[in-house]
Image (tube, rainbow, N blue to C red):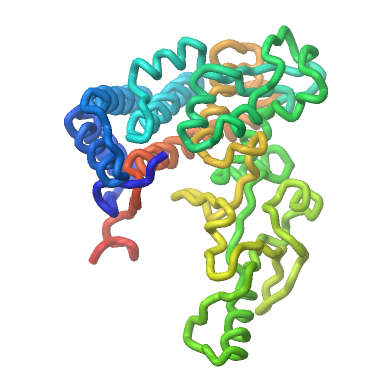
């Protein structure tokens, strides 16, 4: 995707930030405003676009955002209808992101051709396992979702690496054992939502797959030592080493961290300045920033963290939300026996987790879409806060 925008920064200043976010998204429901934005993005990215393509893409962007808002701004709904509307709203936000990018030729006609082959996701159940470990999602070889992954920047090879090779399935028994790693369980998807970290661990009794990370104070100590040695001491000496120390909470189980955590070397619990943390080395070229070499996530409801990629390649948050909502919507629409157990039966502890997830979605996913469509810095804050303009 292109990452250029007509202006360097968008400020959303509102007592209720999500209302301000939707106000900006609603601007592009105007085809003329959408057209100006796509033209400006193309110009900033030095892309030449055919006039007819600009018209078609602006029509797609405005339509997708209008439809997404119809699904997502209905007001309070029961959990069942809320899940279904969030899934379709997320699908239209993803479509809007594709349509807004001047580097591709995606229009409503192209989107229609994608979805003629389905949404690009499938689900399958292993009757020999317990909920939610037995509910699996997989990526199909055609349909919308693989095209969305390509639009987000994955190469065709990377997309193929996420797709289940055996596509004709009558049941779970048709999946070869060698292809089990192409399946993602409902539990694994919920574990990858950082905003649910604590609630997920409380409800399931399992460690989540998001890891709070921060730049260790050990780095600053080393920076001062290096600067003093090289006679370049200053108030904030630059880092000259080809690695950075990254820390995580001491409470994370060691085996879980080693098997599922970020790619750090020399990982062990270290004490520095009275604090004990898991700390490891992240290798990167000297003079470059650590966060350019470790994809992190942060939202209005989550601290900075690293999320274990799904299927080895899916690192962006929005595809994970789409996969999760697809699986939940299947349960809500077509699996009444299972869904009833979630709402008021033997698995009702998951009802609170899923309800909390929809609240997370409502706050963070529209902002994700706004940032992708605007394609530059977006600052969201409330009046009078320390981050608001003076």
Q: Quadrant of the N terminus?
A: top left
Task: Spot the residue most to the left.
Answer: 32
Question: Seen in the image, is 310 located left or right of residue 364?
Answer: right
- State the image coordinates of residue 308 (x, y, percent, origin top left): 65, 44
Which residue is painted at 49% across and 36% down in the image? 318
Residue 75 showing in the rendered view = no
Image height check: is 230 above or below 15? Answer: below
Residue 54, by quadrant, is: top left
In the rendered image of this protein, does residue 131 appear above or below residue 213?
A: above
Between 92 and 44, which is closer to the camera in this rendering?
Answer: 44
Q: In this rendered view, identify the residue nearer to me: 251 or 315.
A: 315
324 or 204: nearer the eye? 324
Q: Where residue 212 sits: x, y (%)?
A: 61, 55
Q: Position of residue 240 (x, y in %)?
A: 58, 75
Query: Can residue 362 be seen at all in this image of the molecule?
Result: yes
Figure quadrant of residue 227:
bottom right
Q: Could you tell me residue 371's position as x and y percent?
A: 37, 44
* Residue at figure coordinates x 66%, y 34% from the top left: 311
């Amino acid at each position: 995707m292109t990452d250029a925008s007509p202006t360097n920064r968008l400020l959303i200043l509102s007592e209720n930030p999500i209302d301000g976010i939707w106000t900006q998204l609603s601007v592009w429901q105007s085809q003329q405003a959408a057209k100006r934005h796509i033209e400006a993005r193309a110009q900033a990215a030095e892309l030449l676009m055919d006039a007819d393509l600009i018209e078609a893409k602006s029509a797609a962007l405005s339509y997708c955002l209008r439809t997404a808002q119809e699904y997502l701004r209905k007001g309070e709904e029961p959990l069942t209808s809320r899940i279904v509307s969030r899934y379709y709203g997320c699908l239209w936000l993803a479509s809007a992101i594709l349509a807004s990018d001047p580097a591709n030729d995606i229009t409503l006609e192209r989107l229609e051709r994608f979805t003629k082959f389905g949404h690009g996701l499938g689900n399958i159940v292993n009757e020999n396992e317990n909920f939610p470990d037995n509910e699996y999602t997989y990526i199909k070889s055609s349909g919308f979702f693989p095209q969305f992954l390509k639009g987000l920047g994955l190469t065709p090879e990377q997309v193929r690496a996420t797709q289940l090779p055996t596509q004709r399935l009558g049941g779970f028994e048709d999946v070869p054992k060698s292809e089990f790693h192409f399946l993602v369980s409902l539990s694994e998807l919920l574990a990858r939502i950082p905003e649910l970290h604590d609630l997920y661990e409380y409800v399931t009794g399992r460690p989540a797959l998001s890891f709070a990370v921060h730049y260790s104070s050990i780095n600053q100590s080393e920076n001062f030592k290096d600067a003093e040695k090289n006679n370049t001491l200053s108030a904030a000496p630059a880092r000259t080493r080809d690695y950075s120390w990254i820390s995580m909470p001491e409470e994370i189980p060691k085996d879980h961290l080693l098997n599922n955590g970020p790619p750090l070397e020399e990982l062990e619990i270290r004490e520095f300045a009275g604090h004990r943390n898991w700390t490891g080395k992240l290798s990167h070229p000297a003079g470059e920033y650590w966060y350019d070499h470790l994809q992190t996530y942060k939202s209005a409801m989550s601290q900075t963290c690293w999320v274990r990629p799904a299927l080895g390649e899916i690192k962006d948050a929005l595809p994970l939300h789409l996969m999760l909502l697809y699986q939940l919507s299947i349960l809500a629409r077509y699996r009444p026996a299972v869904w009833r157990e979630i709402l008021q039966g033997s698995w009702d502890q998951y009802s609170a987790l899923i309800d909390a997830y929809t609240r997370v979605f409502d706050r963070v996913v529209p902002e994700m879409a706004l940032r992708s469509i605007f394609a530059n810095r977006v600052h969201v804050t409330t009046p009078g806060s320390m981050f608001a303009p003076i």
